[in-house]
Structures are given as structure tokens and as C-alpha cells.
Image (cartoon, helix red, strand yellow):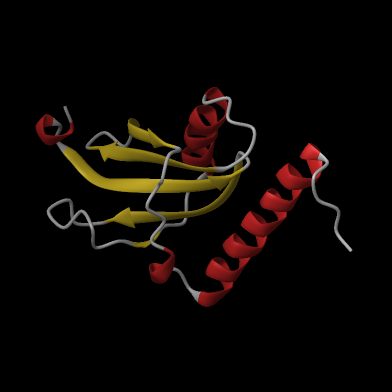
Amino acid sequence: MQPFLDFEYEVSFSFIDCVFQYALHAPDKKQRWKLEKYIPTYNDLDFANLFAYWNTMDHGIQRVDACRTKDGQLLLVELEDLNPFLSLNLLDEDTRNSFVGEFKKALHKVIESTGRYKRA
């Protein structure tokens, strides 16, 4: 349906363990892969969080993709939790380092919860 919707732009919200990390958007819908940093509003995050939690995935990376309609609403385009493309190379260094650090913490939580690994 996406090609048939009249929308302003697309935005992707990235999460680790259901915790928001960053958002990117494509301000020009004709250049979907030319992404820029996006500062979400409270309502934007409320929308994205709804789908992150609805997914019931306790651990891992999720990406909630949406499009902004002409009337300002967000519509879900895709909920990606299997091999989401993260565009880490487009993030500023602080955001990228924060994301990688949070991902490492999430991996350690999962590993430790299995009892197979103990941190020194």
C-alpha cells in the first residue's frame, strides 16, 4: 500500500530491548535511502513504543518504520526485528557509540540469563 499513499516522509525508530535508541528519516520520499537524523516528538515516540511493545520481543533490535501522512499522522509501514538495516554509518559518533554500548549490554543480559557465561 505504501506506494499508493500520499505521505510527507518516512521515519524509522530503532530500539534495543524495547528501549528507544535513535530515529532516522528520509525527508525526500523520492530518495528513500537518503536518511538523516530525526528528533522525534513525544507523540512520535508514543506511536513507535506502541509497536515495539506490541511485538512482545523481550530482547533484541527492532526497527519501527512509519510514514508521516499529509495530515501529520504516522502510519506503520513495517515492524522489523529480523536483520533490520540500522544505517549506523549515518549516525553521529556519540549516537553510534551509545547504540553499540547498549547492544553489548543487551547481549550480556541475554547471555547471563542463560547461565552459560559469567563476567569476570
Q: Residue 21 location in percent, x, y?
A: 56, 53
**Along the viewing direction, whichever of 11 and 39 lies nearer the viewer:** 11
Q: Residue at point 81% right, 50% down?
A: 117
Q: Residue 45 location in percent, x, y?
A: 52, 40
Side of 67 where 95 appears, left or right: right
Q: Quadrant of the C terminus?
A: bottom right
Q: Quadrant of the N terminus?
A: top left
Q: Residue at point 30% right, 61% down?
A: 35
Residue pushed farthest front?
116
On screen, 76 above or below 120? above
Side of 109 where 30 appears, left or right: left
**Along the viewing direction, whichever of 82 and 54 lies nearer the viewer:** 82
On screen, 22 above or below 3? below
On screen, 84 above or below 28? above
**Along the viewing direction, whichever of 22 and 112 lies nearer the viewer:** 112
Q: Residue 4 location in percent, x, y?
A: 10, 30
**Along the viewing direction, whichever of 101 and 67 lies nearer the viewer:** 101
Q: Residue at point 68% right, 49% down?
A: 106
Examine the image and state in which quarter residue 119 appears. Answer: bottom right
Residue pushed farthest bottom?
93
Q: Residue 33 location in percent, x, y?
A: 23, 58
Tally of numbered tags: 0
